[in-house]
Image (cartoon, grey):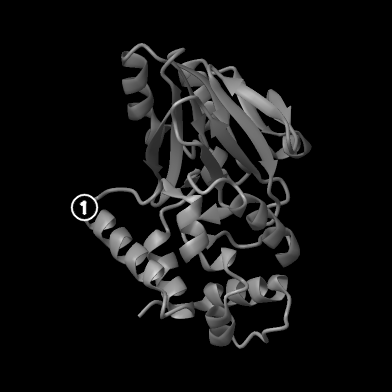
């Protein structure tokens, strides 16, 4: 299993998920055809077949290119949440929480992760000889999480907790390149954290080289993502959240603070 990040629009990512054994591929969250056309054609030129599109949620910057991708490359299988069928273009394979799917020898498990929207999915992928990977859309970002446009803090916290429970070696592929700004906020909340300072320096260096920051691991996220660290005493002290408050309350305070945070 290989994962090829495909930058789209100003800061989106689509992903090509490639099964080398069967020379097939799926495309996650194509925001538009222009972003993915060159990488997809390069893959086809190598003899791979683009078989499927996987949608994490209904927002246009994630599914706006589905129609054009299907028409251009002859893709007939579009995967997404069955309960969100009315909002997902060309959905042919509707799945629900815990359902499984395969792409060649890649095993895919679906996680329902409401919060950013009420129809959000994550795709957990495993294949022999490769680190597991999860495609989180706008639910979990590297060092951050999405805004709650449709869900509640309790829903989002529960979804993030499920994702955080994945094995530490799971590679995290999210929907946007927000990492540098996210880590600035994380450093504001936990200024004594060496893990956050190191991750921030690495992210700044990667972006300086023109490289994506995606492909972090869940183990690293548990160390530096503030939205997975609601129990942190330092985070709570910065936010003024009492020590006996619930993790959901601490998470909600962190998400509210992020909405107005300006990095210095």
Q: Give the residue number, with chain letter if any, for mark 1.
A: 209
Q: Residue 257: x, y in percent?
A: 56, 78
Q: Residue at x 68, y 54 (%)?
A: 159
Q: Is residue 187 left or right of residue 121?
A: left
Q: Is residue 90 above or below residue 217?
A: above
Q: How dense is the environment of label 1, judged by Cα within 10 Å: few (below 14), some, or many (20 and up)? A: few
Q: How many marks?
A: 1
206 or 13, nearer to the observer? 206
Name above or below for residue 23 compared with residue 180: above
| Residue depicted at x 68% and y 59% | 156
Asked if residue 150 can be seen in this view, the reply is no
Asked whether 75 or 146 is in front, the reply is: 146
Residue 110 is at least partly visible in this image = yes
| Residue closest to the eye, 170 or 3 | 170
- State which quadrant residue 58 falls in: top right
Write the residue at 44% across / 27% down. 129
Q: Can you say which quadrant of the picture contains the N terminus?
A: top left
In this rendering, position of residue 224 left or right of residue 95? left
| Rendering coords of residue 140 (x, y %) | 56, 54
Q: Give the residue furthest to the left.
A: 209
Q: From this viewpoint, which residue is outermost toward the right? A: 83
């Amino acid at each position: 299993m290989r994962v090829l990040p495909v930058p789209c629009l100003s800061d989106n990512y689509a992903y090509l998920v490639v099964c080398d054994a069967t020379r097939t591929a799926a495309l996650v969250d194509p925001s538009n055809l222009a972003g993915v056309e060159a990488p997809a054609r390069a893959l086809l030129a190598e003899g791979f077949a683009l078989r499927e599109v996987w949608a994490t949620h209904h927002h246009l910057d994630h599914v706006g290119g589905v129609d054009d991708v299907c028409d251009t490359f002859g893709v007939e299988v579009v995967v997404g949440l069955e309960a969100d069928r009315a909002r997902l273009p060309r959905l042919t394979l509707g799945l629900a929480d815990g359902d499984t799917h395969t792409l060649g020898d890649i095993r895919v498990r679906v996680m329902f992760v409401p919060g950013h929207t009420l129809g959000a999915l994550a795709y957990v992928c495993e294949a022999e000889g490769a680190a597991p990977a999860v495609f989180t859309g706008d639910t979990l970002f590297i060092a951050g999480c999405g805004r709650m446009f449709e869900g509640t803090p309790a829903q989002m916290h529960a979804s993030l907790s499920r994702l955080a429970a994945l094995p530490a070696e799971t590679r995290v592929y999210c929907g946007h390149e927000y990492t540098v700004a996210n880590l600035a906020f994380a450093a504001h909340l936990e200024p004594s954290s060496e893990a956050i300072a190191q991750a921030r320096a690495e992210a700044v260096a990667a972006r300086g080289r023109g490289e994506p920051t995606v492909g972090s691991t869940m183990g690293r996220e548990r160390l530096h993502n503030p939205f997975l660290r609601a129990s942190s005493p330092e985070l709570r002290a910065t936010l003024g959240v009492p020590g006996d408050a619930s993790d959901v309350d601490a998470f909600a305070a962190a998400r509210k603070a992020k909405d107005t945070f300006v990095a210095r």
